[in-house]
Image (tube, helix red, strand yellow):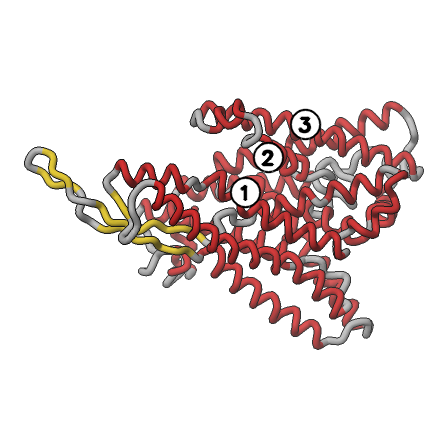
């Protein structure tokens, strides 16, 4: 194993990418501890947890790596960027012009990326305004125009800078930049939550047996996540023989892999991010304060909405990245067909049915993972540990994607696999 790790740093390009990613994540962690000037950060966390609810505050603070509780420059994290991406994804099927941009290749994607950036700026300004208003309303800062403008500009600039870091990691580093930032924030909160859980158990508030159950639950969730993330249905494809001059083409067999969870961690991240909006609005608008008990994390309405949103985003994201009709058309033009299925529209219907069944399994697993921590907390009484199934799914999913990117660099240079016998990465040897 040490030899395989050594191989990573032997490759100059891979070494530079990993060090670049670590450097950018270090900048993110340092910025999370630089507070916006003029705010009483000692009372801020107590006020915010009381206003928006302990559960929602802990959830958002988890995704920002503790930056929200510090009222730091990165207090908003990448949540505005995620919300902007969700809104744009929902608008693409509605507006033909956006759909046309999506189909224009690199230039179209660049334009959509620019729209996402501007949407991020708008949402960051709104959320920065709301947080600054809360700080002044509860007497944690001087109610001056100077502080108000400074706070809004600092929080918005922090989110824009994080968005830039994420894009740079994606381009010059390893893994998806935004996902890596979220993962770094989750890992940063992990030691503190373990310590508070230990204190709860040591104080006798929680039975020690729940610690064993929690550990077993972690192992089961991680194993199940790996299986679902890497699980796929291989549909056999047969290519007909065709003659061109003196050469015969085709006549070989292949397979079409369809993943059980095509969206990876995206459906659960999108669902989590979008559910922060009703809770925030109910907390910040006095006339809607009565809605808070119904929309806080862990409430029945919240969990039902959570499950439905995960199901929706699983199918919605699949419809964006996988089009059975286009695939059936391409197969037909290439002379390929699925044995026992006629080419054309019957092939598209067959692929739609298979994909629908696979997505249902993946979506139900994601929903179960998302709801499981709330059920476990209600049964066990462990309240200090909020790193649940959602966070584990993100950690495992992002970790697998990162390892697969490292694997790709190793394979290109004919090195052995990073993980011996890494069948789950699609490589049997090593």
In the displayed structure image, the side of residue 272 where residue 113 appears, left or right: left
Q: CA distance from mark 3 to mark 1?
A: 25 Å
In the displayed structure image, the side of residue 214 where residue 246 appears, left or right: left
Please report the residue visible at 71 percent of the width from the left and 58 percent of the height from the top. Answer: 386
Q: Are marks 2 and 3 in contact (CB under 8 Å)?
A: no
In the displayed structure image, the side of residue 350 where residue 237 appears, left or right: left
Of the two numbered discs 2 and 3 on the same chain, state the one appearing first in sequence: 2
Please report the residue visible at 55 percent of the width from the left and 54 percent of the height from the top. Answer: 363
* In this view, the mark in front (3 or 1): 1
* 152 or 55, nearer to the observer: 55
Q: Is residue 196 visible?
A: yes
The residue at which mark 2 appears reads as: 90
The residue at which mark 1 appears reads as: 316
Q: Are marks 1 and 2 in contact (CB under 8 Å)?
A: yes
Neighbours of disc 2 within 10 Å: few (<14), some (14-19), many (20+): some
Q: CA distance from mark 1 to mark 2?
A: 9 Å
Q: Is residue 42 visible?
A: no
Neighbours of disc 1 within 10 Å: few (<14), some (14-19), many (20+): some
Please report the residue visible at 74 percent of the width from the left and 40 percent of the height from the top. Answer: 277
In the displayed structure image, the side of residue 113 where residue 428 appears, left or right: left
Question: Which mark is drawn over residue 267?
Answer: none
- Image quadrant of residue 240? top left
- Image quadrant of residue 336? top left
The residue at which mark 3 appears reads as: 121
Neighbours of disc 3 within 10 Å: few (<14), some (14-19), many (20+): some
Of the two numbered discs 3 and 1 on the same chain, state the one appearing first in sequence: 3
Q: CA distance from mark 2 to mark 3?
A: 18 Å
Quarter of the image for the N terminus: give it. bottom left
Q: Secondary structure at mark 1?
A: helix
Q: Does 82 appear above or below 377?
A: above
């Amino acid at each position: 194993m040490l030899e395989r790790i050594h191989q990573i740093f032997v490759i100059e390009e891979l070494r530079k990418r990993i060090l670049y990613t670590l450097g950018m994540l270090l900048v993110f962690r340092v910025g999370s501890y630089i507070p916006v000037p003029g705010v009483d950060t000692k009372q801020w966390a107590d006020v915010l947890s009381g206003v928006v609810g302990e559960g929602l505050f802990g959830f958002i603070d988890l995704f920002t790596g503790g930056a929200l509780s510090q009222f730091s420059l990165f207090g908003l994290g990448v949540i505005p960027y995620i919300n902007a991406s969700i809104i744009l994804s929902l608008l693409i099927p509605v507006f033909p012009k956006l759909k046309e941009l999506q189909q224009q290749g690199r230039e179209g994607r660049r334009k959509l990326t620019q729209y996402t950036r501007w949407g991020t700026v708008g949402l960051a300004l709104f959320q920065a305004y709301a947080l600054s208003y809360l700080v002044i309303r509860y007497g944690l800062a001087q109610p001056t125009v100077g502080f108000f403008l400074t706070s809004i500009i600092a929080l918005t600039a922090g989110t824009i800078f994080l968005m830039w870091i994420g894009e740079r990691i994606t381009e010059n580093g390893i893994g998806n930049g935004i996902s890596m930032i979220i993962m770094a924030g989750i890992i940063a909160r992990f030691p503190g939550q373990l310590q508070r859980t230990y204190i709860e158990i040591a104080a006798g508030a929680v039975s020690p047996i729940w610690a064993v159950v929690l550990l077993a639950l972690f192992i089961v969730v991680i194993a199940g996540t790996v299986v679902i993330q890497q699980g796929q249905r291989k549909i056999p494809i047969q290519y007909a023989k065709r003659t061109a001059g003196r050469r015969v083409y085709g006549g070989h067999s292949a397979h079409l892999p369809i993943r059980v969870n095509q969206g990876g961690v995206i459906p659960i991240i999108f669902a989590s991010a979008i559910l922060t909006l009703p809770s925030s609005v109910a907390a910040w608008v006095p006339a809607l304060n009565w809605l808070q008990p119904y929309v806080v994390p862990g409430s029945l309405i919240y969990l039902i909405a959570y499950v439905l949103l995960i199901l929706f985003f699983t199918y919605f994201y699949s419809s964006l990245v996988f089009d059975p009709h286009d695939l059936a058309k391409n197969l037909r033009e290439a002379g390929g067909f699925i044995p026992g299925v006629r080419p054309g529209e019957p092939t598209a219907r067959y692929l739609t049915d298979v994909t629908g069944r696979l997505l249902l399994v993946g979506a139900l697993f994601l929903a179960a993972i998302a709801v499981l921590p709330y059920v476990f907390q209600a049964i066990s009484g462990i309240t200090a540990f909020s790193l649940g199934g959602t966070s584990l799914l993100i950690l495992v999913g992002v970790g697998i994607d990162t390892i697969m990117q490292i694997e790709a660099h190793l394979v290109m240079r004919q090195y052995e696999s990073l993980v011996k016998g890494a069948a789950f990465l699609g490589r049997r040897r090593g």
